[in-house]
Image (spheres, grey):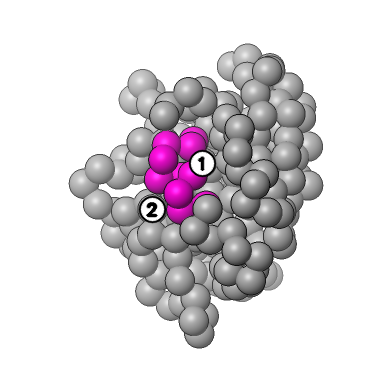
């Protein structure tokens, strides 16, 4: 895997709440220019986008307060390669089984997710998963789980890329990657490398 899969690429990290800096640092290490996205005009000209972990109901509320929600839906449904980690996966999903009051997902990734499926913060864990790459081959990926969601159902166009404790924790659908875990906390670059490999998708 190239250490510089991000060279010459500009990647946005949605920077409203949550684990923004860890993604930015990892993307910098991969050679990418990083834009911390706080307003819709910053979505223009991006090669890829990361929706970080955090608290999905808070991020959801902020996207509406800051008038970012429709712009995000437009950019991502227009083909912008996007990685959602943890709360970011919840944001991308079509349906949330246990949303916070008023919480609405962006509805772009054809999955139903269950928030906090692996227990509380104290039940957080670090492990190594088997990740199914686009070629169909599997390779190990380091993963940290923090109040992580699980995917409880996935539509036909969704490929399952990883399981943990028998639950689906990684999916791919066209330009979208959704993961329940945090590779950016484990110095794990494979999933970000895959995102950067999707640039030019649209
Ligand atoms: N449980 C959180 C939520 O509902 C996600 C946790 C995380 O992103 N680490 O948004």
Q: Residue furthest front?
A: 41
Relative side of 168 to 31, left or right: left
* Cβ atoms under marks 2 and 1 closer than 8 Å: yes
Q: CA distance from mark 2 to mark 1?
A: 11 Å
Work out whether residue 38 can be spotted: yes
Q: Is residue 88 above or below residue 185?
A: below
Is residue 180 one of those drawn in magenta?
Answer: no
Q: Position of residue 108 (x, y in %)?
A: 38, 53
| Residue bearing the label numbered 1 | 82
Q: Position of residue 80 (x, y in %)?
A: 48, 37
Residue 161 in sight: no
Q: Quadrant of the C terminus?
A: top left
Image: magenta residue range: 72-81
Which residue is denoted by mark 2 in the rendering? Answer: 108
User: What residue lies at 30% left-to-right and 44% top-to-bottom?
Assistant: 158
Q: Is residue 183 left or right of residue 116?
A: right
Looking at the image, is mark 2 or mark 1 earlier in the sequence? 1
What secondary structure do most residues of the magenta stretch adopt? helix
**How many marks can you see?**
2
């Amino acid at each position: 895997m190239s250490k510089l899969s991000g060279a010459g690429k500009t990647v946005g990290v949605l920077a409203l709440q949550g684990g923004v800096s860890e993604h930015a640092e990892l993307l910098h290490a991969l050679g990418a220019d990083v834009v911390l996205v706080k307003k819709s005009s910053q979505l223009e000209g991006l090669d890829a986008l990361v929706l970080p972990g955090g608290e999905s109901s808070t991020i959801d509320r902020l996207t509406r307060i800051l008038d970012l929600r429709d712009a995000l839906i437009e950019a991502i449904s227009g083909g912008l390669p996007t990685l959602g980690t943890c709360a970011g996966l919840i944001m991308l999903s079509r349906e949330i089984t246990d949303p916070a009051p008023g919480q609405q997902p962006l509805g772009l990734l054809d999955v139903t997710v269950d928030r906090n499926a692996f227990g509380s913060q104290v039940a957080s864990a670090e492990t190594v998963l088997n990740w199914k790459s686009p070629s169909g081959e599997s390779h190990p990926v380091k993963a940290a789980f923090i109040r992580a969601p699980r995917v409880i159902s996935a539509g036909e166009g969704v490929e399952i890329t990883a399981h943990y404790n028998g639950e689906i924790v990684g999916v791919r659908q066209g330009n979208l990657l959704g993961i329940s875990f945090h590779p950016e906390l484990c110095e794990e670059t494979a999933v970000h490398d895959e995102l950067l490999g999707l640039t030019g998708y649209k």
